[in-house]
C-alpha cells in the first residue's frame, strides 16, 4: 500500500493504492483530521485520486486516475468511479453503482443501487446559482435503482430519475422521469417504455 494516509483513515483487507493518492485529506482545518475515513476490503485506488476526510466507503471500491471525492459521503459496496470524475460532499451512493469518467456529482445527490452514470454526465443542484442564500437551497438529483444516464447528459436540480429508466445520450433532463421509461432530447421527453425496446443482434 502506498499513497499518503492522514490521521483517522482505516482501510480493510488487501488494498491496492497507487502512488500520489491522498486519503483522509482535511477539508477545512486540522480538526478535520479526526473525522474517521473508512474504506472496506479490497479497494483499488489509482494515482492522483484524492479522498477527503469523513467518507464511509464500502468493499471492492475502485477509482480511475485523478478522481476527487469530497467530504462526508456515504458510498456502498462494489462502486466504481472513472478517471477525472468529481464527487462533491454529502452524497449518498448505493451498492454496485458505476460512475464513468469525467462525471460531476454535486453535493446532496443520491444515487441508488445499481444505477449507471455515463461519461461526462453532469448532475446539478442549484436552480438559481447566483441567488441569495443559494447554499441553503441546494438540492441534488435522485437517481433511482437501475436507472441509466447516457453520456454527456445534464440532470437539473432535484429531478427524480425513476427506477429502471434510460436517459438518452446528450439529454437535458428538466423534470422527473417516470420509472421504466426512455427519455431523450433537450429538454428530455418521453420516447418509449423500457419494455418496448428491441435489441438487435449483430
Image (spheres, rainbow, N blue to C red):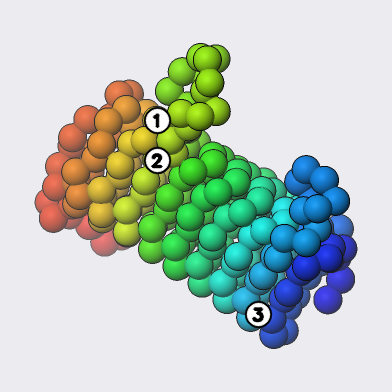
Q: Nearer the viewer, residue 180 or 27?
A: 27
Side (left or right) of 20 relative to 163:
right
Neighbour tally class for label 3: few under 14, some 14-19, many 20 plus, Cα within 10 Å: some
Q: Nearer the viewer, residue 40 or 71?
A: 71
Q: Position of residue 4 (x, y in %)?
A: 87, 63
Q: Is residue 141 above or below residue 64?
A: above
Identify residue for label 1. 156
Q: CA distance from mark 3 to mark 1?
A: 34 Å
Q: Is residue 191 above or below residue 128?
A: below
Q: Residue 107's image quarter?
A: top right
Residue 19 in view, yes or no: no
Determine the residue located farthest toward the top in the rendered image: 131
User: Residue at the spot x=33%, y=31% of the render?
Assistant: 173
Q: Position of residue 200 (x, y in %)?
A: 23, 57
Q: CA distance from mark 1 to mark 2?
A: 7 Å
Q: Are marks 1 and 2 in contact (CB under 8 Å)?
A: yes
Neighbour tally class for label 1: few under 14, some 14-19, many 20 plus, Cα within 10 Å: many
User: Residue at the spot x=60%, y=44% of the render?
Assistant: 88
Q: Please tell me the numbered disc located at residue 42.
A: 3
User: Residue at the spot x=43%, y=23% of the render?
Assistant: 127
First in sequence, mark 1 or 2: give its number.
2
Determine the residue located farthest toward the front in the rendered image: 31
Q: Position of residue 196 (x, y in %)?
A: 12, 51
> Element at badge 3?
loop
First in sequence, mark 3 or 2: give its number.
3
Amino acid at each position: 500500500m502506498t499513497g499518503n494516509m492522514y490521521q483517522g483513515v482505516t482501510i480493510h483487507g488487501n488494498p491496492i493504492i497507487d502512488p500520489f493518492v491522498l486519503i483522509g485529506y482535511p477539508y477545512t482545518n486540522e480538526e478535520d483530521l479526526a473525522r474517521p475515513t473508512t474504506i472496506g476490503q479490497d479497494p483499488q485506488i489509482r494515482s492522483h485520486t484524492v479522498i477527503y476526510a469523513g467518507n464511509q466507503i464500502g468493499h471492492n471500491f475502485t477509482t480511475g486516475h485523478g478522481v476527487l471525492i469530497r467530504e462526508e459521503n456515504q458510498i456502498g459496496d462494489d462502486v466504481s468511479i472513472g478517471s477525472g470524475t468529481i464527487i462533491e460532499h454529502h452524497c449518498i451512493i448505493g451498492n454496485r453503482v458505476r460512475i464513468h469518467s469525467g462525471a460531476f456529482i454535486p453535493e446532496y445527490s443520491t444515487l441508488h443501487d445499481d444505477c449507471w452514470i455515463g461519461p461526462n454526465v453532469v448532475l446539478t443542484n442549484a436552480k438559481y446559482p447566483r441567488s441569495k442564500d443559494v447554499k441553503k437551497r441546494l438540492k441534488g438529483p435522485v437517481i433511482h435503482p437501475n436507472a441509466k444516464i447516457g453520456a454527456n447528459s445534464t440532470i437539473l436540480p432535484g429531478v427524480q430519475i425513476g427506477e429502471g429508466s434510460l436517459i438518452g445520450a446528450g439529454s437535458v433532463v428538466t423534470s422527473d422521469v417516470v420509472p421504466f421509461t426512455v427519455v431523450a432530447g433537450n429538454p428530455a421527453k418521453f420516447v418509449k417504455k423500457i419494455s418496448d425496446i428491441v435489441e438487435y443482434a449483430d
